[in-house]
Image (cartoon, coloured by chain):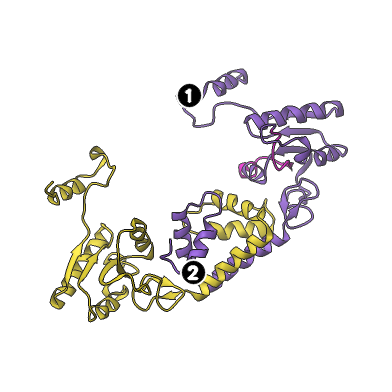
Chain colours: A yellow, B purple
């Protein structure tokens, strides 16, 4: 790969280290960036460094933000007595897109995984427990429906039980628009177990 | 979308303007970038601006480069009497990946397209004709096999005919590994027409 000149090759290589960006996508992006107006490239470049420099954890929910409190924790209209526990800020964004959840969040930044050597102390559980001393009515555990997510959910529910706060888990079931024939057996069984009266 | 704080939201929005990057990919990239070491982000940011600032057209083949001559045109080991005409620097990269082509290139930066109002003067044809006054034995036209690419190939071949230089077109046919049943009729006919003796 020495057919592009130094800078271009360097840009392609750096872009290709990003997740989900293969060498061809990196090439396409690099040539797009090269053909962008200079000011736009400078703006992107500035945003990159500035975002990285200013980012920190929200002192309440631990999501990534650039202010002391994230926009959600800083919003007095949200229901601060309902906390949804998620693994990543992107999971938070997923629930925010529904536009219906009015509580706040707690971002663990991972899930317990004995396989990967990630224990309860490696995720932001201590911060969650500290928050529970406030006025909290319900903790909704919305970790992923994976082995790690389920383990984490179980662990958290046991941790909260002595505190006496209501702890719930989001439902498993058939995704809306999902075709039964394409859905795995475990999900189908969970959907059956979780059936509701019409 | 006001659940991410200012800088993060801004970074996501800027990333989402890049080609092939939707809002979810932009989110994934942004959070990856935020978790990268500061020095790496600064390096990427610097590469972005520097590449954009230094990029120019190779004075021979017109590809994008940051030196007067691109690495290929500046390589004395390449056969400078064979010129492959391609539409974009990425097409050049595609042929370079074969590792077998030893000639040089000419990048048109587009193709003639009456539909899009792109005429012969809008692509780098004049520069190609200037090069033909040198010691050139063959011009291989490797524009895409699309309507625009074919139109451009025809146009170039007619332009070169009076000059008397051998002009060839890369072959149409069944892609290697391709299943006949999945290939369109036009390609199958071209493959038949271009059959070679075994």
- Asked if the magenta segment contains residue B105, the reply would be yes
Would residue A101 appear left or right of A162 to someone viewing this image?
right
Viewer-side residue, A23 vs A49? A49
Q: Is residue A75 above or below residue B11?
A: below
Q: Measured from the top left, where is residue A64 in percent x and y?
A: 41, 71
Q: Is residue A145 above or below residue A158?
A: above
| Element at label 1 | helix
For the magenta stretch, what is the residue range? B95-113
Q: Measured from the top left, where is residue B184 in percent x and y?
A: 51, 24
Q: Label 2: which residue?
A: B6
Q: Residue furthest front?
A: A77
Task: Rate crowding at label 1 as few (under 14), some (14 to 19) or many (20 or more) other CA atoms within 10 Å.
Answer: few
Viewer-side residue, B114 vs A25? B114
Mark 1 vs mark 2, CA separation in Å? 53 Å
Would residue B181 appear left or right of A189 to someone viewing this image?
right
Q: Which residue appears at 29% of the width and 42% of the height?
A: A177
Q: Label 1: which residue?
A: B180
Would residue A171 appear left or right of B8 to someone viewing this image?
left
| Element at label 2 | helix
Q: Which residue appears at 81% of the width and 29% of the height?
A: B159
- Asked if the magenta segment contains residue A182, the reply would be no
**Could you tell me if residue B68 is visible in this image?**
yes
Q: Is residue A134 above or below residue B131?
A: below
**Mark whose residue sits in front, 1 or 2:** 2
- 1 or 2: tag closer to the N-terminus: 2
């Amino acid at each position: 790969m020495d057919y592009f000149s130094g800078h271009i090759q360097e840009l392609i290589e750096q872009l290709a280290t990003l997740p989900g960006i293969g060498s061809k996508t990196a090439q396409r992006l690099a040539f797009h960036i090269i053909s962008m107006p200079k000011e736009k490239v400078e703006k992107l470049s500035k945003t990159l460094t500035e975002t990285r420099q200013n980012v920190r954890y929200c002192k309440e929910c631990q999501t990534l933000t650039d202010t002391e409190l994230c926009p959600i924790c800083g919003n007095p209209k949200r229901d601060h007595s309902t906390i949804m526990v998620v693994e990543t800020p992107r999971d938070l964004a997923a629930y925010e897109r529904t536009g219906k959840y009015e509580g706040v969040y707690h971002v663990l930044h991972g899930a317990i995984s004995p396989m990967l050597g990630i224990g309860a102390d490696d995720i932001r559980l201590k911060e969650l427990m500290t928050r529970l001393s406030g006025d909290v009515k319900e903790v909704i555990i919305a970790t992923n429906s994976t082995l790690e997510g389920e383990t984490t959910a179980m662990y958290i529910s046991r941790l909260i039980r002595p505190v006496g706060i209501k702890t719930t888990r989001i439902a498993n079931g058939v995704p809306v628009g999902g075709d039964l024939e394409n859905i795995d057996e475990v999900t189908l069984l969970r959907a059956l177990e979780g059936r509701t009266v019409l």
